Amino acid sequence: MAVSSFKFALIDSATGHQILHGLAEKLGDDDASITIKRENEKNRLELGKNNQHVDAIKVLVSTLQELGLDNNIGAIGHRVVHGGEMFTQSAVIDDDVITAIEAVSALAPLHNPANLIGIKAAQLAFPGIPQVAVFDTAFHQTMPEKAYMYAIDKDHYKEKGIRRYGFHGTSHFFVAQKAAEWLNKSFETTSVITVHLGNGCSVCAISDGKSVDTSMGMTPLEGLMMGTRSGDIDPGVIMYLMKRYKYDANQIDDFLNKQSGMLGLSQLSNDCRTLEDALNDADNEKRLAAQLTLEVYSYRVAKYIAGYTCALTHLDAVVFTGGIGENSNYIRDIVVKHLGLLGLTIDDCKNQQARFGQAGAINDPTSRTPVLVIPTNEEWVIAQDAAKLTKGVK
Ligand code: AMP
């Protein structure tokens, strides 16, 4: 079995406060471990050989029992990557939901089966506690046909489900809601472009509270350049590599998903912070490689933001989120400066201050549209949905 990991958090769904959180990693490997953090305490336990999700969850359950926190759990929410067209919102998990998640697994062969392992392990460990699946794709199910159809033989859509689905739905939804609060508007009348820049990156056009376009497609490879993913590329490149250099499907997969993006272009790192540091490197070649990579990255983000204005009738704000969007004033500065024709202007001082979890506006007062930085909180959306859907189910 492949080595895998999962994150967990015990959250007060009303406030978003994380009572406890952590990470089980390298499951299936010799050095599998679980790290549990609570307030200022951090405990890391080696799980030993041949340990899987069930074993990690057992450790988590006994920790919760020792701390007297096990009685407080009202519901368990699971992040599920692909819900296909079947799930337009989160769902209480029963046998039918599990069958449906299995049915769309072909569209996300690396993620959905792993999500199901987590669900089944949690069902065993927490019998009687209702469980909810929260889909990365669900928020984007409101996209119109013109946004989700690929220009390919339509039978491939009808028979094989090949269309654009979009991901990061919980993050786009969360920050758009927070933007509406900041703007003092109802979510249903708020139109924003949300820009999630992390290891994975995507842009979303949200019109009156509904996703109407997003940059990831049938898989999380389409759209923006990312840490190790290429984002948009001429599909002709794939044919060329296969025909001329005899790449097979696995090599193409590795090339586009793991060896491209910031890592591939810079040949230095997939990590934005490391590339920003390399801008001051004494080695000229490294400096230029980092500079080019960050320029290509930011230019592509700006092109998507400008492009998505045609999906909206009005634009209330542009919102940056994700590890890079929340912390990199360098990237935000280049992106916003590309958008001068849209009337966006940045305040250098506010931009530099908006880091490390600080939310706020970074635009200059002359900007036609507010530019906001809002930290995402996908775990809280999952907790809220789990609580909302399971009231009274137990
Ligand atoms: P995420 O997947 O949302 O955790 O984001 C990870 C990305 O955020 C990595 O590329 C990090 O280098 C980047 N990141 C985190 N903090 C900073 C920072 N202070 N400046 C620039 N990039 C950052």
Image: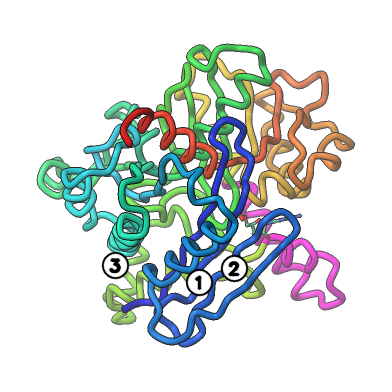
Give SS at disc 1. Answer: strand
Please name the residue shown 43% across and 67% down the image.
58
Residue 327, placed above or below residue 145: below
Task: Determine which of the numbered discs, if any, sits on residue 213 in the image.
Answer: none
What colour scheme has been applied to the protein in the rendered image?
rainbow
| Image location of residue 192, percent across then percent down | 56, 24
Q: Which quadrant does the N terminus fall into? A: bottom left
Q: Are marks 3 and 1 in contact (CB under 8 Å)?
A: no
Please name the residue shown 38% across and 84% down the image.
50
User: Distance between the Cα atoms at labels 3 and 1?
Assistant: 36 Å
Residue 295, placed above or below residue 11: below
| Image location of residue 353, percent across then percent down | 85, 40
Majority secondary structure in the magenta region: helix
Give SS at disc 2. Answer: strand
Q: Earlier in the sequence, mark 2 or mark 3?
A: 2
Q: Which quadrant does the C terminus fall into? A: top left
Task: Determine which of the numbered discs, if any, sits on residue 239 in the image.
Answer: 3
**On the image, numbered disc 2 is attached to which residue?**
35
Label 1: few (<14), some (14–19) or many (≥20) C-alpha neighbours in 10 Å: many
**Magenta segment, which residues?**
272-300
